[in-house]
Image (cartoon, helix red, strand yellow):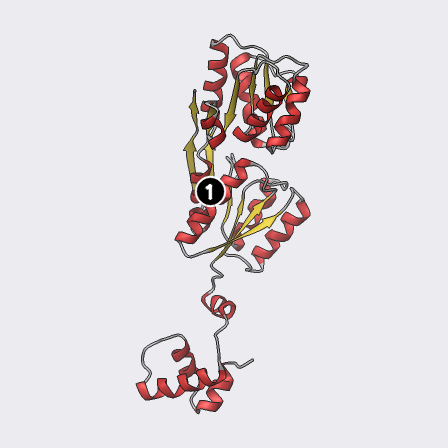
Amino acid sequence: MANIHDIARLSGFSTATVSRVINQQHYVAPSTRAAIQAVIDQLDYVPSTMAQNLSAGKTRTIGVILPHTDHPYFEQLVTGILNAAMAGNYHAVILPSRYDQSLEQDYLEDLRRHAYDGLIFTSHGLGLRTIAKYQKYGPIVVCENPGKIKLAAAYADRTPAYQEAFQWMGSQGYSKIALLLSRPYAQSATSKLTINSYVDVFGKRPSDEMIVYHMRTFEDGYQAGARLVNEHPDFILGNGDDITAGLRQYFVDHHLPIPPLMGQENQLSSRLLQMSTIDHHVTAIGAAALKLALRDDIAQTVIQSDLILR
């Protein structure tokens, strides 16, 4: 494959002059530019994008660490990231992790080797302190409140909306409330916020039999319906509208009374079913995360969640 030295040799000009023509810089005589361009065309030379990026010190690529794709939260988050990346003429590369800490460590090492200009952790298995140590190699953004750890972050302030939701449930007389969650309390910031908000309002932790974990899809919700039907909850809060719609479908298919329901993320399913929901504005969070990943400073963007009663 032809390179800049081949062009210089065949054209009779220096590599510096050839470089100015390739990069469309000024200070090259028209006749010189034409002669060099003729050799470029003859050799069918195309400059290496990777080499140009390395020369500029930028890859124009942001790595997006994603545990899985089959949860509405991550679908909407990635949509926001990709939309913002396209608008800024950047590439967003999806890096699947499955919460595997060794994989996440590899991605951090890739940042250290300048494979990406920055990383966005949509969620993580590694501890935040470990992640924060790699900021000296490039911007790192998390999609949760990092607390006292100094990390760039874009996230929803969920607690007021969760508390408002539980207060509303209590005002309606509901006391046997079931929760659908993605991961156990110790592993998930969202699960902690949900359960802690429940405790703040009701003064006690929900019983274990009223919490169903590993909820990510419509089918997961359907299976949760089969489990909860014998617990007789008087209200169910799901961790996604589509997940909650799946639970609802179990009751419909088995000709059972549908308990009052609330989902999250304000998806089409909740609007069609006229189901209450909590909107965390996840697409906006994704867009904010991408913008933070392009900055050199450590900043945070916090978006307020909204309770929508239908």
Asked whether, in this view, residue 30 is left or right of residue 129, the answer is left
Q: Mark 1 points at which residue?
A: 286
Vertical relation: 45 (above or below) 230 = below
Q: Where is residue 258 in the image (x, y as percent from the top left)?
A: 57, 16
Q: Which of 84 and 148 is in front in this view?
A: 84
Task: Examine the rendering and report whether any part of residue 251 can be seen.
Answer: yes
Q: Residue at x 59, y 24 (%)?
A: 249
Identify the secondary structure beneath mark 1: helix
Q: Is residue 297 visible?
A: no
Q: Where is residue 103 in the image (x, y as percent from the top left)?
A: 66, 49
* Screen quadrant of the N terminus: bottom right
Q: Can you say whether 176 is above or below 41 in the image?
A: above
Residue 199 spot, x, y in % from top left: 56, 17
Q: In this view, does 61 lie above or below 260?
A: below
The one nearer the camera, 117 or 182, is 182
Q: For this rendering, which residue is in front, 38 or 253?
A: 253
Q: Residue furthest top?
A: 173
Say which residue appears at 63% left-offset and 31% top-offset.
219
Q: How crowded is mark 1: few (under 14 residues within 10 Å), some or many (20 or more)?
A: many
Quadrant of res 304: top left
Q: Quadrant of the C terminus?
A: top left
